[in-house]
Image: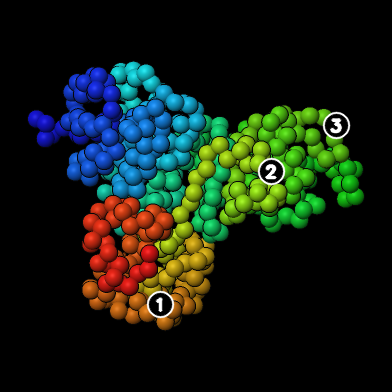
Amino acid sequence: MAEDKTKLLIVEDDEGLQAQLKWAYDDFEVVIVGNRKDAIAALRAEEPPVVTLDLGLPPDPDGTTEGFAVLDEIMAIKPDTKVIVASGHGARESALNAIERGAYDFYQKPVDIEKLGLIVRRALNLHEIEEENRRLAAKAGDGNVVLGNLITAAPEMVRVARTIERVANTNVSVMLLGASGTGKELLAQGVHNASGRKDGAFVAINCAAIPENLLESELFGHEKGAFTGAVKTTEGKIEQADGGTLFLDEVGDIPLPLQVKLLRFLQERTIERIGGRKSIAVDTRIVCATHQNLEAMIEDGRFREDLFYRLAEVVIKIPSLAERPGDATLLAKVFLKRFAEEMNPSVTGLAPDALAAIDAWGWPGNVRELENRVKRAVIMADSKLVGAQDLDLDGEDGEASDALNLKSARERSDRKMIRHALARSEGNISSTAKMLGISRPTLYDLLKQYDLQH
């Protein structure tokens, strides 16, 4: 019966192809729409686990603008949806763009019904596995573990992890953009572990932590006698990462002269050690990260544009901890358990005022700040439960004091979600209302009620 079948949403404006696709999936309840408005309405009403999306939709049937707008809305509303994108326009560029935005897979038109069917069924299988993992994780109270070592309950972070899983088995260079303390190295390690290079070395170097005059030697190595103190031949980080992954953290701090040499390596895939004349072939995958605005640095002449495009074939933006609802308290519990086992076994959990303070605090230092506060609190705690005072969060946010008041808790939750939606939509009221699943008048009422600026 139709009601027992899994729903498949097909977003396609070609009526002939609509008819073909409708009858190609007997084991699905197929819902077909031909434009952006109907696609989003169907997504909300039917909540399909898998969507096939043609990028060429009206009013831009010969382009990709409207299709990518649909993809962005799907990812904002229901980021665990597996979206399979189709296009005949600029296949490689569109594919990379789609995956970066959160699509599960990409196929180039003309459509091969049989091949597309395999992709759809594979996507559904993955969605079912992820759903089961989420149910088990929720039951265990440990959140959702993705990429093997990343713990999160936030759809925003799950989307980042899924993007990484999709690009991991390619050789494209990945650039991770995010504030300090958001876990960029952890995610870079995730790229490596999910790739075919996982048995090779993962070599990380913080370009901001090494003096400029030493950074070239650290990256490219040197021959014996190349300079004062070079008493032996030394491999650089690039060479050490042969067959594996090289992670360049804070890549924006590489000085311009060294940027030229790095660009030459990316073009030729060979290096010369300092003081050497022999070209050494190196096969490594580059993942880099920065908290800086590289596009602004390019305009100022502080970062090479050609190097940027070599390093940023896929750009992944990492949300701050404040943009990941629920993750602060989830991670705090994980950190507390770990540090208590190591340093203070008498500590068994977090007090209610600590949980409220963690949830209310903005975490400007992101996960690193949270980890440090919890570690210090576990060491200094005098009782079994870590309190807000132990975390140095008591009195820092007036909302924490009424943690057990249901009305206040609801207001805090409403405020947080509205702020997040406004930030993601850059203050656009219509987009914010859509993200929150409410009408514009309702959103205006809430903004007035909570005295929120927009």
Q: Which residue matches tag 2?
A: 304
Comparing marks 1 and 3, which lies closer to the viewer?
1
**C-alpha distance separating marks 2 and 1:** 43 Å
**Which of the pair 312/201 is nearer the observer?**
312
Q: Relative to 450, does residue 245 appear above or below in the rendering?
A: above
Q: In percent of the image, x 33 and y 62: which residue is there?
A: 418
Q: Relative to 168, does residue 383 appear above or below in the rendering?
A: below
Q: Which residue matches tag 1?
A: 397
Comparing marks 2 and 1, which lies closer to the viewer?
2
Badge 3 local density, few (<14 within 10 Å), some, or many (20+)?
Answer: few
**Which of the pair 346/9 is nearer the observer?**
9
**C-alpha distance separating marks 1 and 3:** 61 Å
**Answer yes or no: do the residues labelled 2 and 1 have beta carbons within 8 Å?**
no
Q: Which residue matches tag 3?
A: 277
Q: Relative to 156, does residue 59 appear above or below in the rendering?
A: above
**Which of the pair 427/27 is nearer the observer?**
427
Quadrant where the C terminus sits is bottom left
Q: In percent of the image, x 39 and y 58: which residue is there?
A: 427
Q: In percent of the image, x 90 and y 50: which residue is there?
A: 228
**Tag 2's secondary structure?**
loop
Quarter of the image holding residue 19? top left
Amino acid beneath label 2 = Arg
* Sequence-wise first label, 1 or 3: 3
* Sequence-wise first label, 2 or 1: 2
